[in-house]
Image (spheres, rainbow, N blue to C red):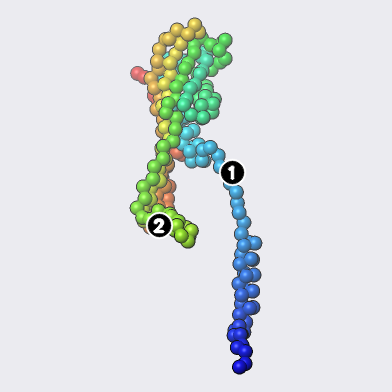
């Protein structure tokens, strides 16, 4: 009985397979991976924090501090404390407050920035992104309506002391905030609404 013959591959099958392999290799070689080093706060969060501090300091009544050399201490519950201290000093100096070192001051200011934070929230109407447990195939998010929001807040409390440490007064609090919102409609339509770039208005002097 004659031996069974192996079925021959269709003409060109090997060449087609080789072409597919080469195409995949070419695409893989053409892909570029861009690595972005993350920061502790995103650019949006940093802008919200900065603008909130600006508006909080602008909301302060600095009239009682006019022509007085003052030493500044600022305290916050976040890692942004050092930046907030230096930025608040510059903002006060821009408003005419003389901020000096401790041995040259006639008043000491203890400034408490709390809260000094960015709160975020998200509302999604649609299908969130997920990954199939068996095939490990990621499914992208399908947003019929999505609202991403971030709110920066800075509340500033200022307490004044004399050089001996005796409490003198508490200045009216300063409040500042900034908001950032991104809306996505029907997957492809996306736009941002924010007041970060709006001008900062200083509080009018008391009558």
Q: Residue at x 46, y 26 (%)?
A: 77
Report crowding for label 1: few under 14, some 14 to 19, many 20 or more residues within 10 A (C-alpha). Answer: few
Q: Residue furthest bottom?
A: 1
Q: Would residue 11 appear left or right of 175 to someone viewing this image?
A: right
The kind of secondary structure element at disc 1 is loop
Residue designated by label 2: 142
Q: Position of residue 33 (x, y in %)?
A: 61, 54
Residue at the spot 49% in from the left edge and 6% down from the top edge: 164
Give the vertical position of 38 relative to 82 (above or below). below
Residue farthest front in this picture: 1
Q: Quadrant of the N terminus?
A: bottom right
**Residue displayed at 42% across by 24% down:** 156
SS of the residue under disc 2: strand
Name the image quarter holding residue 3: bottom right
Q: Earlier in the sequence, mark 2 or mark 1?
A: 1
Instruction: Say which residue label 1 marks.
Output: 37
Q: CA distance from mark 2 to mark 1?
A: 28 Å
Question: At which x and y percent is residue 195?
Answer: 42, 39
């Amino acid at each position: 009985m004659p031996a069974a013959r192996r079925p021959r591959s269709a003409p060109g099958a090997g060449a087609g397979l080789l072409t597919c392999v080469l195409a995949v290799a070419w695409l893989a070689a053409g892909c570029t991976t861009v690595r972005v080093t993350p920061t502790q706060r995103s650019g949006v969060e940093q802008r919200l924090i900065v603008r909130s501090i600006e508006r909080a300091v602008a909301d302060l009544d600095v009239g009682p501090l006019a022509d007085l050399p003052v030493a500044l201490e600022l305290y916050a519950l976040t890692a942004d404390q050092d930046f907030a201290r230096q930025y608040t000093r510059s903002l006060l100096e821009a408003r005419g407050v003389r901020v000096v070192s401790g041995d040259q001051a006639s008043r000491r200011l203890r400034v408490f920035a709390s809260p000094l934070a960015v709160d975020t929230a998200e509302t999604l109407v649609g299908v969130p992104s997920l990954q199939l447990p068996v095939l490990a195939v990621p499914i992208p998010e399908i947003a019929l309506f999505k609202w991403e929001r971030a709110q920066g807040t800075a509340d500033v409390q200022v307490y004044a002391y004399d050089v001996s440490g005796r409490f003198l007064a508490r200045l009216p609090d300063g409040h500042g905030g900034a908001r950032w919102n991104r809306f996505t409609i029907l997957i492809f339509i996306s736009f941002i609404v924010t007041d970060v770039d709006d001008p900062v208005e200083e509080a009018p002097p008391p009558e």
